[in-house]
Amino acid sequence: MWNKILSKARSMTPTKVRKTFTIIIGFTLLIFGIILIFTPGPAIVVIPLALFVLSSEFAWARYWIRSIKHHVTKINGDLGKYFPEDADDAEKK
């Protein structure tokens, strides 16, 4: 059994190895992030990180990264209306 696994691993090119590790790490982070939604933890950080890792291999992950960027930019712009950067200068006048 181990001989089969080792011979297959030897026949894999570095590109295939990189893709395999990227997929394994990305999905592990994604599952961990989903678990963190229901338990106390930084799911809001882990899930985008997992999507960022997976976006190098999958188009659906790139779509979600673009969607997250769009929403964060929109929220940031909306907050800028209520919290201007030069709030200290406005108080001085």
Image (cartoon, rainbow, N blue to C red):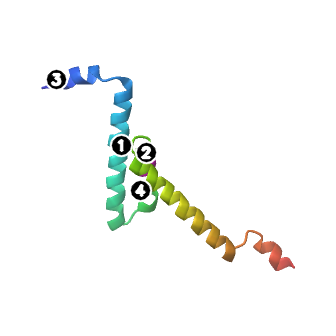
Q: Tell me, yes or no, whether the two marked residues, 2 and 1, touch with CB atoms within 8 Å.
A: yes
Pointer 2 or 1: first along the chain:
1
Circles 3, 4 touching at the beta carbon (< 8 Å): no
Q: Earlier in the sequence, mark 3 or mark 2?
A: 3
Left or right: where does residue 87 sit relative to residue 4? right
* Left or right, residue 38 beside residue 61: left
Which quadrant of the figure has residue 7?
top left
| SS under mark 4 | helix
Name the residue located 38 percent from the left edge and 24 percent from the top edge.
14
Residue 12 in the image: x percent, y percent? 30, 24
Query: On the image, numbered disc 3 is attached to which residue?
Result: 4
Task: For marks 1 and 4, give the CA distance.
Answer: 12 Å
Give the residue displayed 41% in from the left and 61% down from the top.
43
Is residue 42 visible in the rendered structure shown here? Answer: no
Spatial distance from mark 2 to mark 1, Cα to Cα?
8 Å
Residue 83, percent across and down?
A: 68, 74
Q: Amino acid at mark 3?
A: Lys
